[in-house]
Image (spheres, helix red, strand yellow):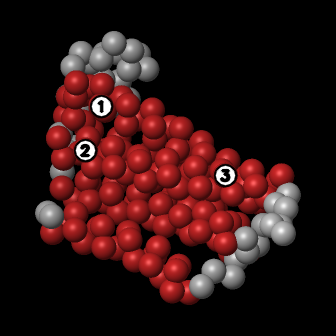
């Protein structure tokens, strides 16, 4: 007989998984935006781009992608903050609370680095922006894995596999692969 998952637990699991998936998609969109140089379409004007308010009617495909990246980043940022709030309000384990807090605390620096990628399109800033994205993605993904396992007692090998993704991705990014 399958066990019944309480509504609050199921909502937290869904939020954790959705936040991890959204953060991953944001990273993919960010990689596309950065490698195509679409931040440069804003001509070092941040937060505006093309003189448009809230990205309405972008001038070209590059501007559209840049604004779409910002929109997804905003939604992901609120999802991360919501996940952290749910973890702390819901009395989750210390590990889950600290992981979500770590992701939320890194967000302001990620926003600043995002602005710098538009105003100062340099490899060091791009790498820092990508590395910071991975610093956010790792704890969010760990929380999703822990919540899907039904407890914080996730097999160390499974968690090590998840933990290996960001450093490997960063190494590939730096190596230019």
Which quadrant of the view contains residue 92? Answer: bottom right
Most foreground residue, 58 or 15: 15
Which quadrant of the view contains residue 87? Answer: bottom right
Which residue bears the numbered disc 1?
A: 65
Which residue bears the numbered disc 3?
A: 14
Q: SS at mark 3?
A: helix
Say few, some or many: other residues with alpha carbon within 10 Å of mark 1 (under 14 / 14 to 19 / 20 or more): many
How far apart in space, not on screen, are marks 2 and 1 (Cα)? 9 Å
Say few, some or many: other residues with alpha carbon within 10 Å of mark 2 (under 14 / 14 to 19 / 20 or more): some
- Say if residue 53 shows up in the picture: yes
In-image side of 81 versus 85 (left or right): left
Most foreground residue, 168 or 150: 150
In-image side of 65 versus 87 (left or right): left
Quadrant containing the C terminus is bottom left
Contact, mark 2 vs mark 1 (Cβ under 8 Å): yes
Residue farthest along the front direction in this orientation? 1
- Say if residue 98 shows up in the picture: no
Which quadrant of the view contains residue 115? Answer: top left
Residue drawn at 26 percent across, 25 percent down: 63
Which residue bears the numbered disc 2?
A: 32
Residue farthest along the top direction in this orientation? 57
């Amino acid at each position: 007989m399958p066990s019944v998952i309480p509504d609050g637990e199921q909502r937290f699991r869904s939020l954790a998984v959705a936040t991890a998936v959204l953060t991953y998609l944001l990273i993919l969109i960010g990689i596309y935006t950065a490698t195509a140089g679409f931040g440069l379409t804003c001509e070092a004007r941040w937060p505006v781009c093309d003189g448009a308010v809230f990205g309405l009617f972008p001038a070209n495909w590059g501007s559209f992608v840049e604004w779409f990246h910002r929109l997804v980043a905003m939604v992901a940022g609120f999802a991360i903050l919501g996940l952290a709030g749910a973890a702390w309000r819901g009395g989750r384990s210390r590990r889950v609370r600290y992981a979500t807090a770590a992701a939320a605390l890194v967000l302001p620096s990620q926003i600043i680095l995002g602005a710098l990628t538009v105003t100062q399109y340099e490899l060091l800033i791009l790498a820092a922006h990508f590395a910071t994205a991975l610093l956010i993605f790792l704890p969010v993904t760990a929380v999703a894995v822990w919540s899907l396992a039904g407890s914080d007692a996730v097999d160390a090998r499974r968690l090590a596999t998840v933990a290996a993704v960001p450093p490997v991705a960063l190494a590939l990014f730096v190596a230019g692969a």
